[in-house]
């Protein structure tokens, strides 16, 4: 399978614990996005990478959230001191391009449940 | 928060009826994309519109981008049960990189 891969698919954690999600984008895709989606809502933008550079981060994003894409390939999203409100599906998407907005290819997502 | 608005939130039609979902933004969009998400699945790209007044068709689906690049619509002719899912519009606001999604319109088609 050469699509976007996300791990783990499911994560249950207790409030206050840290969690990390990993995203492996489609090979050679230089753009990578993280989104969060809750039931009945559209994907909410979290952050955007172009190669290894984090070029945009949602102003609504708590400083407990951090993302990296160290070599411009895979990316990690870490949530520190999780809260129940962090429970959601975390989606990663990748695309290719230098201008405009290309087609986003989404992974299956990582579902987080905070108890 | 959501800066791209979609209506209606839900639509229930009989198979064979037409369906339309509307997308609006208070800010001019650089482009508009449409995605479909099946229950339990992830969003899948349908189309991108870039030019003012652009109209594109994919079989029974017709997509329009408004003249002012602030609104868009997706029209499905003669719905089928395979059209079930949530349809999202997503647009870039100004020079930002973020693709902002609407809340989506959930379509239910009964045979």
Image (cartoon, grey):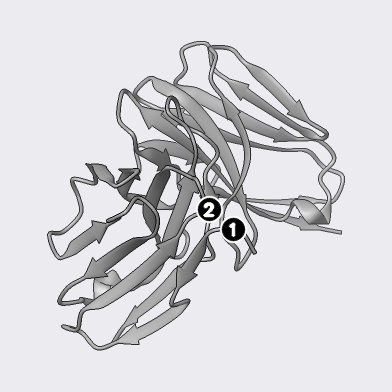
Compared to residue B104, the image places residue A65 above or below, namely below
- The residue drawn where x is 26% and y is 43% is A53
Of the residues under marks 1 and 2, which one precedes in the sequence? 1
- The residue drawn where x is 48% and y is 76% is A9
Judging from the image, mark 1 belongs to the subunit labelled A
Q: Secondary structure at mark 1?
A: loop
Question: Callout 2: few (<14), some (14-19), or many (20+) C-alpha neighbours within 10 Å?
Answer: many
Q: Camera-side residue: A30 or B48? A: A30
Compared to residue A53, the image places residue A108 above or below, namely below
Question: Callout 1: few (<14), some (14-19), or many (20+) C-alpha neighbours within 10 Å?
Answer: some
Residue placed under numbered mark 1 in the picture: A3
Q: Is residue A10 left or right of residue A49?
A: right
Q: Camera-side residue: A34 or B56? A: A34
Q: Is residue A41 visible?
A: no
Relative image position of residue B9 (x, y in whole percent): 53, 49
Relative image position of residue A7 (x, y in whole percent): 44, 73
Judging from the image, mark 2 belongs to the subunit labelled A
Q: Find residue A26 and name its label.
A: 2
Relative image position of residue A98 (x, y in whole percent): 43, 28
- The residue drawn where x is 81% and y is 35% is B60
Marks 1 & 2, CB-CB < 8 Å contact: yes
Q: Is residue A81 visible?
A: yes
Q: Find residue B17 and name its label.
A: none
Q: Is residue B83 left or right of residue A11?
A: right
- Could you tell me which quadrant the C terminus of chain B lies in? bottom right
Q: Is residue B48 left or right of residue A109?
A: right
């Amino acid at each position: 399978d050469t699509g976007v891969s996300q791990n783990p698919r499911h994560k249950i954690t207790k409030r206050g614990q840290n969690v990390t999600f990993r995203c492996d984008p489609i090979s050679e895709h230089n753009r990578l996005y993280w989104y969060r989606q809750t039931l009945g809502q559209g994907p909410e933008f979290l952050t955007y990478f172009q190669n290894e550079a984090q070029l945009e981060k949602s102003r609504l994003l708590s400083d407990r959230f951090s993302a990296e894409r160290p070599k411009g390939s895979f990316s990690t999203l870490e949530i520190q001191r999780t809260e129940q409100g962090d429970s959601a599906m975390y989606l990663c998407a990748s695309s290719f391009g230098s201008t405009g907005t290309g087609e986003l290819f989404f992974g299956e997502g990582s579902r987080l449940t905070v108890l | 928060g959501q800066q791209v608005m979609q209506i209606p939130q839900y639509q229930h039609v009989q198979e064979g009826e037409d369906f339309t979902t509307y997308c609006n933004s208070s800010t001019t969009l650089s482009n508009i994309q449409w995605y479909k998400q099946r229950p339990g699945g992830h969003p899948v790209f349908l189309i991108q519109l870039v030019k003012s007044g652009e109209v594109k068709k994919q079989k029974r689906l017709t997509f329009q981008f408004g003249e002012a690049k602030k609104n868009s619509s997706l029209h499905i002719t003669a719905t089928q049960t395979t059209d079930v899912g949530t349809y999202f519009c997503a647009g870039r606001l100004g020079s930002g990189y973020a693709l902002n999604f609407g809340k989506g319109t959930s379509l239910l088609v009964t045979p």
